[in-house]
Image: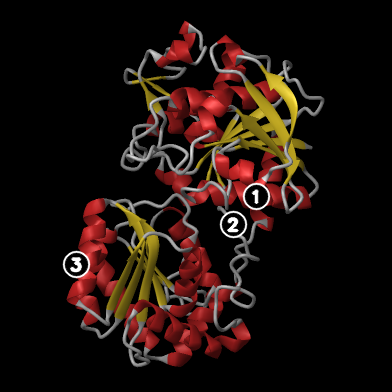
């Protein structure tokens, strides 16, 4: 079976969230299972530096008559995955965030940039493809490639079935009505069963309407987005397409996230050597300027600082957390007001709360290994990866029961399967109650150790999700 995997992000080179991780990990898992998979991604500067020997295999002059000319490059990734890169200097040769300029605002031409990516993905899955290799399945991801099924419906003759995965329904690719012509779409696409969405053109809405199948990144999130509360305005359409909607839980890279071999850790450990974990706690306390204290739990956060992640709830109860007593370390960036509030919080509690604004891959790994429990109080979370990293590192997560968090974390009240702490309502008092439960259980080493081992025993790798995707491909 041949699968074309179209993505706007590719870790570790271009990544703003979980999409980049999935694009890096799922295709190799599919390839190991016998699928002939090729990944299509833009030729960003970071990609060009990583693949200097990528050769041009096709010219795409002024695709669809409206897009700038482009070329298709080919190379093999270090893990053996076949790569296709869309080379268009006018669209993709921009450093930094793939969607935002240095001023933090969306690039003015994002509709054309990702319209071109969608069009070329559709082209390679159609009878007009310039390549001899022809996919059976076109697998698109989020709004940036969601127009591909639309082009296959209106502009091209499809040879492949299309799958669209929603990584986060909040990002919908909304543009003005005038972009219909810029994208080379016919007037008939401007309809309730096309790309029109309350007077805007929505990449995601068009894809949800025309993809042969829709997936999202956890079973619970697939149910939640069909409700008016969590459907982000798309609930009606998703209910209409419920028979073609499946939730498949993401996996994690179990080689990159493995405390037994992690190069970022001063001391390695596994389920049988959990006692070694404490050395990483001491190293983290030292690196972050926290007091060396073995008599209190250390809680941690690695996250985008945003309202979605529920970190305002943590701010509201952090002073009480310190009184337990406990310590807190935070790594992340995002909303300027939240960044400022966390800096002020650390200043109020020197030696007990440490905050690092920004992102540091090595520090993220040390936090997962060095803290006692991970805080993830998200208002919504399509899948979440950090709670699975935490489980693998023997670091029980404290989460709100939403999306993929509800699918992966079992409350400690379940003595046989418990691996963390779960609370229901997005309220500071609920989060604080869960933190207090965790601190109480942490003080009982035998019970805490069982909680850690339960989490570490589960397989959160990509083999099972890859098999579920293969079964879906076959059904199409």
Q: Residue at x 48, y 33 (%)?
A: 143
Q: How is the image coloured?
A: secondary structure
| Crowd rating for badge 2 (residues with CA inside 10 Å; few <14, some 14–19, many 20+) | many
Element carrying mark 3? helix
In this rendering, is residue 82 above or below 264? above
Q: Position of residue 363 (x, y in %)?
A: 46, 70
Determine which of the numbered discs, if any, sits on residue 26 in the image: 1
Return the residue nearer the eye: 324 or 438.
Answer: 324
Element carrying mark 2? loop
Q: Residue at x 63, y 61 (%)?
A: 461
Q: Residue at x 41, y 52 (%)?
A: 381
- Which residue is label 2 attached to? 251
User: How far apart in space, not on screen, are marks 1 and 3 (Cα)?
Assistant: 40 Å
- Which residue is label 3 attached to? 344
Q: Which numbered disc, 1 or 3, marks the residue closer to the eye? A: 3
In this rendering, is residue 353 above or below 98? below
User: How far apart in space, not on screen, are marks 2 and 3 (Cα)?
Assistant: 36 Å
Q: Is residue 25 left or right of residue 238?
A: right
Residue 419 showing in the rendered view: no
Return the residue nearer the eye: 155 or 77.
Answer: 77
Whichever of callouts 1 and 3 sits on the residue coming sooner in the sequence is 1
In this rendering, is residue 392 above or below 165? below
């Amino acid at each position: 079976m041949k699968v074309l995997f179209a993505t706007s992000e590719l870790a570790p080179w271009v990544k703003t969230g979980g999409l980049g991780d999935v694009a890096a990990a799922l295709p190799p898992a599919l390839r190991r299972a016998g699928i002939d998979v090729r990944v299509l991604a833009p030729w960003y500067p970071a990609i060009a530096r990583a693949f200097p020997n990528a050769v041009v295999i096709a010219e795409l002059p002024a695709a669809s008559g409206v897009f700038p000319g482009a070329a298709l490059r080919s190379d093999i990734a270090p893990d053996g995955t076949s790569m296709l890169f869309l080379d268009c200097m006018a669209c993709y040769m921009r450093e930094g965030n793939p969607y935002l300029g240095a001023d933090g605002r969306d690039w003015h031409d994002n509709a054309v940039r990702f319209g071109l990516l969608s069009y070329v993905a559709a082209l390679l899955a159609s009878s007009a493809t310039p390549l001899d290799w022809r996919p059976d399945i076109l697998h698109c991801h989020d709004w940036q490639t969601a127009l591909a099924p639309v082009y296959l419906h209106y502009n091209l003759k499809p040879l492949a079935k299309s799958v669209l995965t929603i990584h986060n329904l909040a990002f919908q690719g909304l543009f003005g009505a005038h972009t219909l012509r810029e994208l080379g779409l016919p007037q008939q696409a401007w309809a309730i069963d096309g790309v029109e969405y309350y007077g805007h053109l929505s990449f995601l809405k068009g894809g949800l309407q025309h993809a042969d199948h829709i997936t999202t990144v956890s079973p619970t999130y697939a149910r939640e987005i069909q409700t008016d509360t969590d459907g982000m305005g798309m609930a009606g359409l998703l209910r209409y397409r419920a028979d073609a909607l499946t939730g498949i839980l993401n996996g994690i890279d179990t080689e990159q996230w493995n405390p037994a071999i992690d190069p970022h850790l001063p001391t390695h450990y596994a389920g049988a050597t959990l006692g070694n974990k404490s050395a990483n706690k001491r190293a983290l306390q030292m690196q972050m300027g926290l007091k060396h204290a073995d008599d209190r739990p250390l809680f941690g956060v690695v996250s985008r600082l945003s309202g979605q992640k529920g970190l305002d709830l943590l701010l509201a109860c952090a002073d009480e957390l310190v009184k337990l007593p406990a310590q807190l370390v935070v790594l992340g960036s995002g909303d300027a007001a939240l960044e400022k509030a966390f800096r002020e919080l650390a200043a109020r509690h020197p030696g007990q709360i440490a905050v690092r604004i920004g992102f540091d891959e090595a520090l993220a790994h040390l936090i997962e290994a060095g803290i006692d429990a991970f805080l993830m109080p998200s208002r919504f979370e399509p899948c979440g990866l950090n709670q699975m990293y935490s489980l693998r590192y023997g670091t029980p997560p404290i989460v709100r029961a939403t999306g993929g968090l509800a699918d992966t974390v079992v409350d400690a009240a379940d003595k046989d399967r418990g691996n963390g702490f779960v609370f229901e309502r997005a309220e500071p008092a609920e989060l604080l109650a869960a933190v207090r439960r965790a601190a109480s259980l942490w003080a009982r080493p035998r019970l805490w150790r069982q909680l850690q081992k339960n989490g570490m025993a589960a397989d959160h790798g990509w083999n099972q999700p890859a098999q579920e995707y293969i079964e879906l491909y076959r059904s199409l």
